[in-house]
Amino acid sequence: MSTLILIPARMASTRLPGKPLADIAGAPMIVQVARRAAEAGLGRVVVATDSEAVAEAVHSHGFEAVMTRDDHQSGSDRIFEALTVLDPDRKVETIVNVQGDLPTIEPEIIGAALRPFEDRSVDIATLGVEIVRDEEKTNPNVVKIVGSPLSATRLRALYFTRATAPWGEGPLYHHIGLYAYRRSALERFVALKPSPLERRERLEQLRALEDGMRIDAEIVQSLPLGVDTPDDLERAREILSN
């Protein structure tokens, strides 16, 4: 199937201003993410941004960028606009949304997000990793997947929460915010209004579940570093410099 990888990037960040252009091992962070996405070998890679500076940096390093509006409320809305601009003939069947603050993500992890589409009933695919640190089990910033096991490496998502769940003995899974959409699913999703549970948990993916869409999560073995703070940025620099 025809796959398009889209990387949403905006300059507004309260904790790390100018984050997409932060230098990591000689290149802007957004370029490092584009490199990892290209190494996944899934298809065309394009950065979707509202910043001319980001677009120029991306172009100067040999990657594609498309300008989008600056009033989008979410990355999903931004990548949908980019999709309509890049593919008016509707040849793309699958869209992978790679967050623009994952410069150290392994290309194999990006590819793993497509595996749940082996089942044609899956609308949206995402990733999870088993939580091994006790403090993360109770951390509301660590989003958990509550799901029904389909195999040793796959869950059918029933809920996403910031709470410690599910209760009882057994593994807990950290949700990795990377999504693959069937085109029809992305079109359906962005047409929906924010849902009650989405507003309450502040988790966009609950909108899809509340509307009856199916989300499956592939379980991987490593958690990519999300760069949200100056300390995260230093860690990413150390990882990629080595």
Image (spheres, rainbow, N blue to C red):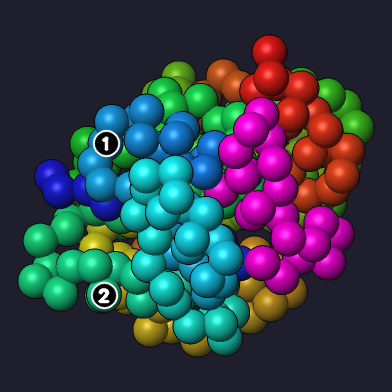
User: Along the line of sight, which residue is nearer the eye, 213 or 181?
Assistant: 181
Q: Is residue 170 found left or right of 7 in the rendered image?
A: right
Residue 186: give x, y in percent of width and height. Answer: 33, 67
The answer to whether any part of residue 65 appears in the image is yes
Residue 99 lies, with reference to residue 188, above or below; the image says above
Q: Amino acid at mark 2?
A: Val
Q: Which mark is residue 85?
A: 2
Residue range corresponding to the magenta coloring:
11-30
Quadrant in the picture for the C terminus: top right
Quadrant in the picture for the N terminus: top left
Residue 119 lies, with reference to residue 239, above or below; the image says below
User: Along the line of sight, which residue is nearer the eye, 139 or 83?
Assistant: 83
Image point (66%, 29%), residue name: 25
Residue 34: give x, y in percent of width and height. Answer: 45, 42
Q: Is residue 76 within the magenta segment?
A: no
- Specify which label sits upstream in the sequence, 2 or 1: 1
Q: Amino acid at mark 1?
A: Leu
